Image (cartoon, coloured by chain):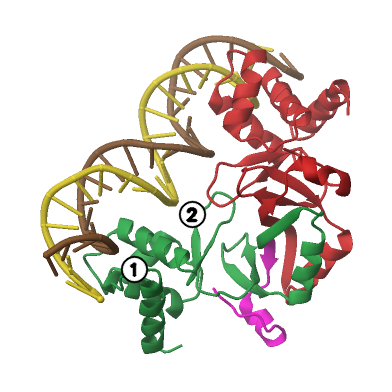
Chain colours: A red, B green, C yellow, D brown
DNA sequence: GTGAATGCAAAACCTTTGCAACTGG
DNA sequence: CCAGTTGCAAAGGTTTTGCATTCAC
């Protein structure tokens, strides 16, 4: 998605919710699309500050919250760590490498997700599932030739 | 598990880690075993206070942390809500009813968990999985005759 | 023009920590 | 006895909020 398309997509989606497209929201969203590495709000703040020196951390939080509300971004939580933000809207799991702190997207076959939902007893209707692995991953260099996973740092 | 067995289990497990069995730890653990409804630290505090009026919230946090370290209890997090504590050590998922805030244990077939782990690319070794459903559940009254799920309020 | 969004600072919230007093093995 | 644990209060880190100013539509 080119920056232009991203911006159009953003303003259209915001407009659909009666919200305004602001420079801050654009820049925050663009930063998430550029480096898809699940940054925290603080990290987003650090990344957008050079482009928008007057932006405040509170605004970054507000923008991220807005993007989450509009379903343009997913909020990802591991334990009690700071929330992270992810523009991958596909159903997917996350892998948290406990030694590096890095988070990787893990593609899921829809069939597996279906199987999971079937584990729910009657009367339970799931609107969402969150699947988080935690563990260790080999260094990317060793791994790169035999995996197909997006490395979202 | 009778209270006596629970206490023996507790002191043995603590001893194995070089930790002491204290009245506070016993009461906190007992409260988790008694009402298996995923209470927060504040809720545990409220429940144990009558039995141990001098206990402090910080001690409840410390006891819970200790129990988690000893693998007698699991810590469960939903989004940024306060942590909840669960004495069910079996591999299981959680269902978070967004309208009532209640959390239900969901039994998982080991085969499904296996399938999930197979979604991981080579080089990723998961030491744990967290699976959280979020959605709506029918009132227990309507549901009780056709489900077998533990209702952990 | 006008309500929405920003920026700042302060508050809120959950959780951890420092430290003196206490206690379990 | 004495290291481990408690209770209290204070601090910590993340996120939200109040409010005056600015901005998008």
Q: Residues within 10 Å of mark 1 (few under 14, many from 20)?
A: few
Can I make out residue B129 in this image? no
Q: Nearer the viewer, mark 1 or mark 2?
A: 1
Query: Which image quarter is the C terminus of chain B in?
Result: bottom right
Q: Quadrant of residue B125?
A: bottom right
Residue D9 higher or lower than B58, as above or below: above
The vertical placement of B93 against B140, above or below, is above
Based on the picture, tell me whether residue B144 belongs to the magenta stretch: yes
Asked whether, in this view, residue B87 is left or right of residue B49, the answer is right
Identify residue for label 1. B19
Residue at mark 1: chain: B
Please state which of residues A25 and B117 is positioned toward the viewer in this rendering: B117
* Residue B123 picture location, percent across and down: 77, 53
Q: Which residue is mark 2?
A: B82
At horizontal 69% and vertical 87% (from top left) the residue drawn is B145
Residue A53 image offset from top left, x and y in percent:
60, 13
- The image shows residue A52 at horizontal and vertical percentages of 64, 14
Residue displayed at 77% across by 69% down: B114
Q: Which mark is residue B74?
A: none
Label 1 element class = loop
Identified at 38% across, 79% down, the residue is: B12
* Left or right of B60 in this view: D22: right
Q: Is residue B68 magenta?
A: no
B86 and B98: which is toward the camera? B86
Q: Which residues are magenta?
A: B132-153
């Amino acid at each position: 998605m080119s920056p232009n398309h991203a911006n159009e997509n953003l303003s259209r989606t915001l407009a659909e919710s009666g919200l305004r497209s602001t420079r801050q929201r654009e820049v925050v969203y663009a930063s998430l699309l550029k480096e898809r590495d699940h940054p925290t709000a603080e990290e987003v703040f650090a990344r957008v500050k050079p482009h928008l020196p007057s932006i405040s951390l509170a605004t970054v939080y507000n923008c991220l919250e807005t993007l989450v509300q509009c379903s343009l971004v997913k909020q990802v939580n591991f334990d009690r760590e700071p929330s992270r933000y992810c523009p991958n809207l596909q159903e997917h799991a996350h892998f948290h490498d406990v030694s590096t702190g890095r988070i990787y997207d893990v593609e899921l076959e829809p069939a597996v997700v279906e199987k999971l939902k079937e584990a729910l007893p009657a009367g339970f209707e799931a609107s969402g599932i969150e699947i988080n692995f935690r563990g260790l991953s080999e260094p990317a260099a060793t791994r790169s030739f035999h995996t197909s996973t997006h490395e979202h740092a």
